[in-house]
Image (cartoon, rainbow, N blue to C red):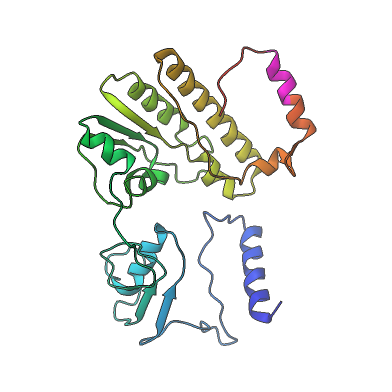
């Protein structure tokens, strides 16, 4: 490992030792012996942001190309030549290496809206952009008949790993019971948000909270004759219960205990 990589790796380890996880880690900057930043971006530099997502990347890009009002200290006079790998936001004044070939049309939500039916989306603020912007084909617009519910996420999800799962479940159950809602979409972000950390106790609480919430939601869907589709796209928590794809003795014991209880819906 070269000295630069080693210095930054040790800085990250030091942050971990201070109790800073990925979600709470303070900014890190490598400095020279005089305490000056190494490799700081200067006027006239060419910057390529190669990330292919479009969430925090928007705010970070704005800090360079539209710095006023971003919410943290920046140099408002810094002038750089900025390019992004994909289009994060059509309104950003940047060059885009691989712009979209066309705008997405006829997405699920748009199709339901065009049919004159209502759509209800429920999550919490941590994932609001996913159900709003991304699910609408990267369009920052609510289609006619679209309702969004997003209670504020806790400031420290590791202290409250249940997050807003109960509120989300309540709102989804209410939406399922609403005969005017043709499509109901929900997102429980615990696995993603809490799963990025290394707090096993918090992760297990998050898993249990999602399990309870999904069980409640599916039970209502069954009684109402509503088709429910459950998906998951994150794998940060499985290794706490499944080693190399196999259940651990603790998992098997938990299954034996649950087998004597009344079956509940599982995700």
Q: Tell which of 235 and 113 is nearer to you.
A: 113
Q: Tell which of 76 and 58 is nearer to you.
A: 58
Q: Which quarter shows the N terminus?
A: bottom right
Q: Is 257 included in the stretch rendered in magenta?
A: yes
Q: Tell which of 129 and 32 is nearer to you.
A: 129
Residue drawn at (52%, 55%) of the image:
24
Residue drawn at (19%, 38%) of the image:
144
**x, y percentage for residue 104?**
31, 52
* 165 horizontally vs 106: left or right: right
Query: How would you classify the magenta stretch by its main secondary structure?
Result: helix
Above or below: residue 95 compared with residue 60: below
**x, y percentage for residue 233?**
53, 44
Q: Which quarter shows the C terminus?
A: top right
Q: Tell which of 205 and 35 is nearer to you.
A: 205
Q: Count of labels shown?
A: 0
**x, y percentage for residue 242?**
72, 39
Q: Which residues are magenta?
A: 254-260
Q: Is 17 included in the stretch rendered in magenta?
A: no
* 100 horizontally vs 220: left or right: left
Above or below: residue 161 compared with residue 4: above
Above or below: residue 90 compared with residue 262: below
Specify the farthest residue to the right. Answer: 249
**x, y percentage for residue 225?**
41, 15
Residue drawn at (52%, 23%) of the image:
215
Residue drawn at (51%, 82%) of the image:
37
The quadrant where residue 63 appears:
bottom left
Evaluate whether residue 175 shows in this view. Answer: yes
Evaluate whether residue 158 shows in this view. Answer: no
Above or below: residue 14 compared with residue 197: below
């Amino acid at each position: 490992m070269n000295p630069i990589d080693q210095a930054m790796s040790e800085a990250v380890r030091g942050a971990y030792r201070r109790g800073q996880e990925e979600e709470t880690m303070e900014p890190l900057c490598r400095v020279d012996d005089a305490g000056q930043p190494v490799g700081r971006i200067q006027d006239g530099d060419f910057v390529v942001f190669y990330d292919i997502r479009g969430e925090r990347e928007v705010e970070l890009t704005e800090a360079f190309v539209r710095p006023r009002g971003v919410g943290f200290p920046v140099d408002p006079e810094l002038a750089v030549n900025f390019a992004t790998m994909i289009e994060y936001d059509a309104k950003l004044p940047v060059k885009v290496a691989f712009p979209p070939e066309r705008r997405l049309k006829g997405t699920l939500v748009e199709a339901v809206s065009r049919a004159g039916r209502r759509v209800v989306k429920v999550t919490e603020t941590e994932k609001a952009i996913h159900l709003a912007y991304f699910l609408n084909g990267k369009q920052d617009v609510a289609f006619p008949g679209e309702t969004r519910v997003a209670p504020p996420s806790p400031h420290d999800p590791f202290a409250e790993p249940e997050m807003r799962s109960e509120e989300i479940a309540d709102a989804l159950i209410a939406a399922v019971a609403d005969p005017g809602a043709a499509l109901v979409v929900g997102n429980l972000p615990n696995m993603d948000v809490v799963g990025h950390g290394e707090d096993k106790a918090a992760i297990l609480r998050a898993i249990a909270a999602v399990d309870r919430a999904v069980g409640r939601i599916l039970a209502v869907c069954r009684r109402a004759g509503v088709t429910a589709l459950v998906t998951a796209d994150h794998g940060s928590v499985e290794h706490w219960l499944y080693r190399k794809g196999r259940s651990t003795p603790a998992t098997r014991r938990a299954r034996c205990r649950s087998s004597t209880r009344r079956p509940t819906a599982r995700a």
